Image (tube, rainbow, N blue to C red):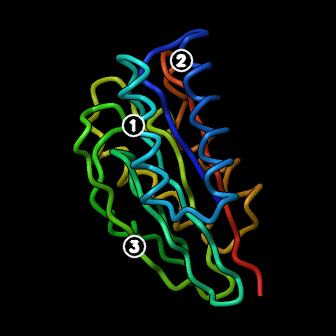
């Protein structure tokens, strides 16, 4: 199971909300619940808890089949690096957690051959003052292509350096995963 999320707000309350979502997702994933159903349940948790909202990507990789099954809740797309190219995976349907009781979350299955790298990240990695998210996403893909065949440690180091200083008012998370043969 892979997960990256971002709770709106700052401080102890945001940290507590994210911890609750993380441990809730982990517990439900152990029961075999698919990612889109996990997001439905996490959405209900937030709706019942109050006014918090969050974005999230949840993905399950099945190595024997070479397939990534994933869902998202208002989160940025997953970046796919393969053969020196970077492309964003088409996002399934899903609005932010805590936005409404009737939220629906789609599910995508993506084949992943060995050698592919996936980048899951929060907006703090690409969001800069005076720049829209599309520009930040394009910059991330452009820089990622330069290091698409490198190990994940190098990819992360180059991206965090080349994209400039992180947004000081936002948390930043970058998860790089390499699909091994």
The image quadrant that residue 166 belongs to is top right
Q: Is residue 42 above or below residue 47?
A: below
- Cβ–Cβ below 8 Å for labels 1 and 3? no
CA separation, marks 1 and 3?
Answer: 21 Å
Instruction: Assess disc 3: are there few (<14), some (14-19) or many (≥20) residues with their C-alpha within 10 Å of its C-alpha.
Output: some
Depth check: 139 or 16 in front?
A: 16
CA separation, marks 2 and 3?
Answer: 28 Å
Residue mark closest to the camera, 1 vs 2 = 1
Sooner in the amino-acid sequence: mark 1 or mark 2: 2
Q: Which residue is mark 2?
A: 14
Image quadrant containing the N terminus:
bottom right
Q: Is residue 20 above or below residue 169?
A: below
- Cβ–Cβ below 8 Å for labels 1 and 2? no
Left or right: residue 40 compared with residue 4: left
Q: Which residue is mark 3?
A: 108
Depth check: 159 or 79 in front?
A: 79
Q: Which mark is residue 44?
A: 1
Sooner in the amino-acid sequence: mark 2 or mark 3: 2
Sooner in the amino-acid sequence: mark 1 or mark 3: 1
Left or right: residue 102 compared with residue 180: left
Instruction: Assess disc 1: are there few (<14), some (14-19) or many (≥20) residues with their C-alpha within 10 Å of its C-alpha.
Output: some
Left or right: residue 122 compared with residue 89: right
* Residue drawn at point x = 66 percent, y = 74 percent: 149
């Amino acid at each position: 199971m892979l997960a990256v999320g971002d709770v709106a707000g700052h401080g102890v309350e945001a940290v507590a909300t994210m911890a609750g979502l993380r441990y809730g997702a982990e517990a439900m994933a152990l029961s075999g619940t698919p990612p889109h159903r996990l997001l439905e349940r996490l959405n209900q948790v937030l709706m019942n808890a109050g006014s918090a909202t969050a974005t999230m990507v949840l993905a399950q990789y099945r190595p024997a089949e070479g397939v990534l099954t994933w869902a998202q809740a208002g989160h940025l797309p997953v970046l796919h690096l393969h053969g020196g190219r970077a492309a964003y995976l088409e996002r399934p349907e899903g609005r932010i957690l805590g936005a409404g009781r009737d939220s629906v979350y789609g599910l995508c299955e993506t084949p992943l051959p060995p050698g592919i790298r996936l980048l899951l990240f929060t907006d703090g990695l690409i969001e800069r003052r005076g720049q829209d998210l599309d520009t930040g996403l394009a910059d991330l893909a452009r820089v990622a292509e330069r290091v698409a065949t490198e190990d994940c440690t190098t990819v992360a180091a180059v991206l965090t350096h080349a994209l400039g200083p992180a947004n000081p008012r936002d948390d930043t998370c970058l998860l790089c995963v390499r699909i091994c043969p």
